[in-house]
Image (cartoon, rainbow, N blue to C red):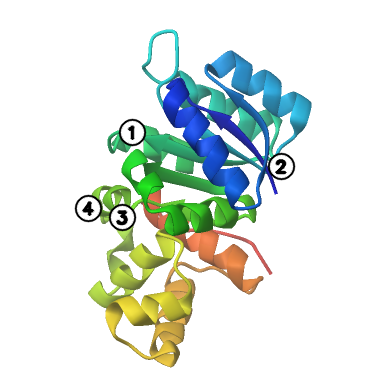
Amino acid sequence: MRVLIAEDLALLRDGLVRLLRDNDFEVVAAVGDADALVHAARRERPDVAIVDVRLPPSFRDEGLRAALELRATVPETAILVVSQYVEHAYATELLASGGGGVGYLLKDRIMHVDEFVEAVRRVAEGGTALDPEVVAQLFSRRGPLEVLTPREREVLGLMAEGRSNAGIASALVLSTGAVEKHVASIFQKLRLRQAPEDHRRVLAVLAYLQGQPSSSDLR
């Protein structure tokens, strides 16, 4: 799996390179600013780009802007954004760009190596990986999705973090069968028609995070 890293702090950038290579990723480039990120992504076409939200020169949202540009121009490259803090507007804008293969994690999560590596793989494979803190803030906006029960919102929150049905069952102390029923109910209430399971999970998560029900025409 081929990875591109965009992080301005050299120490963290080098640490990410070593961590990922130690876990069988191929790091095709590691850059320190947004322009270099865009050029490297177009040249290397990596499976996933790990991008700091704030990059030079102003350290505001250059990384996010570059990530959104890549979503539009190099759509085959998944995006995993990392940030020092939960930035509600940035997370929402990234997720609203549509489709799977997207993640938003706090930098503290990198210290949990196994979880971080799993998140990189999941995003690269077209799934989602959202930091629990990001999920908590975004899910505080119920919007028209109040049709979901409290338990269904819990299930969908864990889906947003990228957990499998088995992982959700463990976290909520439910049987896998019970989780499957909740997931099926979520799909029905969000009007997500029949499609591959993984794709519908991504669409359900995106629908919830964007605060609007889906009108997907998937068949």
Whole-number angstrom distance, CA of label 1 to CA of label 3: 16 Å
Q: Position of residue 35 (x, y in %)?
A: 59, 14
Picture quadrant of residue 55: top left
Q: Which mark is residue 76?
A: 2
> Which of pointers 2 and 4 indicates the residue nearer the eye?
2
Q: Under tag 3, what secondary structure?
A: helix
Label 1: few (<14), some (14–19) or many (≥20) C-alpha neighbours in 10 Å: few
Q: Is 179 displayed left or right of 73 in the figure? A: left
Q: Amino acid at mark 3?
A: Pro
Q: Give the labeled residue for mark 3.
A: 132
Q: Amino acid at mark 2?
A: Glu
Q: Give the labeled residue for mark 4.
A: 140
> Which of pointers 4 and 3 indicates the residue nearer the eye?
3
First-in-chain label (4 vs 3): 3
Q: Give the labeled residue for mark 1.
A: 89
Q: Is residue 213 visible?
A: no
